[in-house]
Image (cartoon, grey):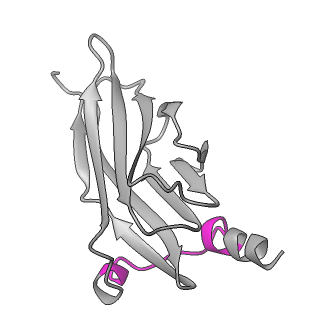
Amino acid sequence: MVFSILFRLLFFFPGFSIPAESNSTIPLPESIQVTRTFQRVPDKNDYTVTVSIQSSGITGFARYTDFLPPDAQVTILQSAGSEARTIDGKVKFVWTSMPTDPEIKVIYTIAFADSKLIMHYRGEFRYLSDNVVRNYDLTPSDLKLIGE
Protein backbone atom coordinates (compact mmCIF):
# COMPACT_ATOMS: atom_id res chain seq x y z
CA MET A 1 0.00 0.00 0.00
CA VAL A 2 2.75 2.45 0.96
CA PHE A 3 4.71 1.59 -2.19
CA SER A 4 1.60 2.10 -4.33
CA ILE A 5 1.06 5.58 -2.88
CA LEU A 6 4.75 6.43 -3.20
CA PHE A 7 4.77 5.20 -6.81
CA ARG A 8 1.77 7.35 -7.72
CA LEU A 9 3.23 10.42 -6.05
CA LEU A 10 6.62 9.98 -7.71
CA PHE A 11 5.47 9.25 -11.22
CA PHE A 12 1.91 10.43 -11.80
CA PHE A 13 1.25 13.50 -9.63
CA PRO A 14 0.67 16.24 -12.23
CA GLY A 15 2.52 19.03 -10.44
CA PHE A 16 5.60 17.01 -9.52
CA SER A 17 8.84 17.89 -11.23
CA ILE A 18 12.54 17.76 -10.53
CA PRO A 19 14.61 20.75 -11.63
CA ALA A 20 17.14 20.18 -14.40
CA GLU A 21 19.96 20.89 -11.94
CA SER A 22 19.21 17.61 -10.14
CA ASN A 23 21.64 15.77 -12.40
CA SER A 24 24.56 17.73 -11.03
CA THR A 25 23.54 17.36 -7.38
CA ILE A 26 22.73 13.63 -7.41
CA PRO A 27 25.50 11.64 -9.08
CA LEU A 28 24.37 8.68 -11.14
CA PRO A 29 26.02 5.30 -10.81
CA GLU A 30 28.61 4.70 -13.54
CA SER A 31 26.60 1.73 -14.77
CA ILE A 32 23.59 3.80 -15.95
CA GLN A 33 23.52 4.84 -19.59
CA VAL A 34 20.51 5.84 -21.69
CA THR A 35 20.74 6.36 -25.45
CA ARG A 36 18.04 7.21 -27.97
CA THR A 37 18.23 6.83 -31.75
CA PHE A 38 15.89 7.93 -34.52
CA GLN A 39 15.50 6.21 -37.87
CA ARG A 40 13.39 7.75 -40.60
CA VAL A 41 10.73 5.44 -42.07
CA PRO A 42 11.13 5.56 -45.87
CA ASP A 43 8.47 7.51 -47.82
CA LYS A 44 6.65 8.65 -44.65
CA ASN A 45 6.73 11.43 -42.07
CA ASP A 46 7.48 8.82 -39.40
CA TYR A 47 10.45 7.89 -37.26
CA THR A 48 11.24 4.71 -35.37
CA VAL A 49 12.60 5.64 -31.95
CA THR A 50 14.78 3.14 -30.08
CA VAL A 51 15.71 3.81 -26.46
CA SER A 52 18.42 1.65 -24.94
CA ILE A 53 18.76 1.64 -21.14
CA GLN A 54 21.82 0.02 -19.59
CA SER A 55 20.55 -0.29 -16.07
CA SER A 56 22.56 -2.76 -14.04
CA GLY A 57 21.76 -2.29 -10.39
CA ILE A 58 18.30 -0.71 -10.75
CA THR A 59 15.73 -3.06 -9.25
CA GLY A 60 12.73 -0.93 -8.30
CA PHE A 61 10.46 1.66 -9.86
CA ALA A 62 11.63 3.34 -13.06
CA ARG A 63 10.12 5.46 -15.83
CA TYR A 64 11.32 6.59 -19.23
CA THR A 65 9.53 9.58 -20.82
CA ASP A 66 9.80 11.30 -24.19
CA PHE A 67 8.07 14.66 -24.63
CA LEU A 68 6.09 14.79 -27.89
CA PRO A 69 5.07 17.60 -30.25
CA PRO A 70 1.38 18.42 -30.65
CA ASP A 71 -0.61 16.01 -32.85
CA ALA A 72 2.11 13.31 -32.84
CA GLN A 73 0.80 9.76 -33.18
CA VAL A 74 2.71 7.02 -31.32
CA THR A 75 2.65 3.26 -31.90
CA ILE A 76 4.44 1.15 -29.28
CA LEU A 77 6.47 -1.65 -30.88
CA GLN A 78 8.42 -2.99 -27.89
CA SER A 79 7.81 -2.10 -24.23
CA ALA A 80 10.43 -4.28 -22.43
CA GLY A 81 7.93 -5.37 -19.79
CA SER A 82 6.80 -1.85 -18.94
CA GLU A 83 3.36 -0.33 -18.86
CA ALA A 84 3.59 1.86 -21.97
CA ARG A 85 1.18 4.68 -22.76
CA THR A 86 0.84 8.05 -24.39
CA ILE A 87 -0.62 10.73 -22.14
CA ASP A 88 -0.46 14.54 -21.86
CA GLY A 89 1.87 14.94 -24.85
CA LYS A 90 4.32 12.33 -23.55
CA VAL A 91 5.09 8.69 -24.24
CA LYS A 92 5.86 6.90 -20.96
CA PHE A 93 7.28 3.48 -20.15
CA VAL A 94 6.78 2.63 -16.46
CA TRP A 95 8.26 -0.35 -14.63
CA THR A 96 7.17 -1.24 -11.09
CA SER A 97 10.23 -3.47 -11.02
CA MET A 98 13.00 -2.80 -13.52
CA PRO A 99 13.99 -5.89 -15.57
CA THR A 100 17.26 -7.48 -14.48
CA ASP A 101 18.68 -7.56 -18.02
CA PRO A 102 21.85 -5.42 -18.26
CA GLU A 103 20.35 -3.65 -21.31
CA ILE A 104 16.71 -3.16 -22.19
CA LYS A 105 15.20 -1.51 -25.25
CA VAL A 106 11.90 0.22 -25.81
CA ILE A 107 10.89 0.92 -29.40
CA TYR A 108 8.06 2.98 -30.83
CA THR A 109 7.16 4.84 -33.99
CA ILE A 110 6.13 8.46 -34.06
CA ALA A 111 4.09 9.82 -36.97
CA PHE A 112 3.71 13.48 -37.83
CA ALA A 113 0.79 14.98 -39.74
CA ASP A 114 2.83 18.08 -40.62
CA SER A 115 5.59 17.42 -43.16
CA LYS A 116 7.18 20.82 -42.50
CA LEU A 117 8.14 20.23 -38.92
CA ILE A 118 11.25 20.94 -36.89
CA MET A 119 10.89 19.47 -33.45
CA HIS A 120 13.04 19.84 -30.35
CA TYR A 121 12.85 16.34 -28.84
CA ARG A 122 13.75 15.64 -25.23
CA GLY A 123 13.51 12.71 -22.87
CA GLU A 124 14.24 11.64 -19.31
CA PHE A 125 14.78 8.49 -17.29
CA ARG A 126 13.73 8.47 -13.63
CA TYR A 127 14.21 5.72 -11.12
CA LEU A 128 14.04 5.14 -7.39
CA SER A 129 17.27 4.28 -5.58
CA ASP A 130 17.68 4.21 -1.79
CA ASN A 131 14.30 6.02 -1.48
CA VAL A 132 15.61 8.91 -3.61
CA VAL A 133 14.31 9.77 -7.07
CA ARG A 134 17.21 9.88 -9.52
CA ASN A 135 16.90 11.68 -12.85
CA TYR A 136 18.82 11.21 -16.10
CA ASP A 137 18.07 13.82 -18.80
CA LEU A 138 18.92 12.86 -22.37
CA THR A 139 20.64 15.35 -24.62
CA PRO A 140 17.85 17.03 -26.63
CA SER A 141 17.65 16.19 -30.34
CA ASP A 142 16.14 18.04 -33.28
CA LEU A 143 13.99 16.14 -35.78
CA LYS A 144 13.58 17.91 -39.12
CA LEU A 145 11.06 16.92 -41.74
CA ILE A 146 11.48 20.01 -43.92
CA GLY A 147 12.96 19.06 -47.28
CA GLU A 148 13.71 15.48 -46.25
Q: How many marks?
A: 0
Instruction: Say which of 8 and 74 sits in front.
Output: 8
Q: Where does residue 147 sit, x and y in percent of width and height?
A: 15, 22
Q: Residue 23 falls in which quadrant of the image?
A: bottom left
Q: Is residue 71 left or right of residue 14?
A: left
Q: Where does residue 61 sit, x and y in percent of width and height?
A: 59, 66
Residue 22 shown in magenta: yes
Instruction: Say which of 119 and 61 sits in front.
Output: 61
Residue 70 shown in magenta: no
The residue drawn where x is 26% and y is 73% is 30
Q: The C terminus is located in which quarter?
A: top left
The residue sitting at the top extreme is: 43
The residue drawn where x is 61% and y is 61% is 97
Q: Is residue 143 left or right of residue 122?
A: left
The secondary structure that most of the magenta stretch takes on is loop
- Read off the magenta span: 9-23
Q: Where does residue 77 sit, x and y in percent of width and height?
A: 49, 29
Q: The N terminus is located in which quarter?
A: bottom right
Q: Where does residue 38 sit, x and y in percent of width and height?
A: 27, 35
The residue sitting at the bottom extreme is: 25
The residue drawn where x is 32% and y is 82% is 21
Q: Is residue 140 above or below residue 49?
A: below
Q: Is residue 127 left or right of residue 88?
A: left
Q: Is residue 5 above or below residue 42?
A: below
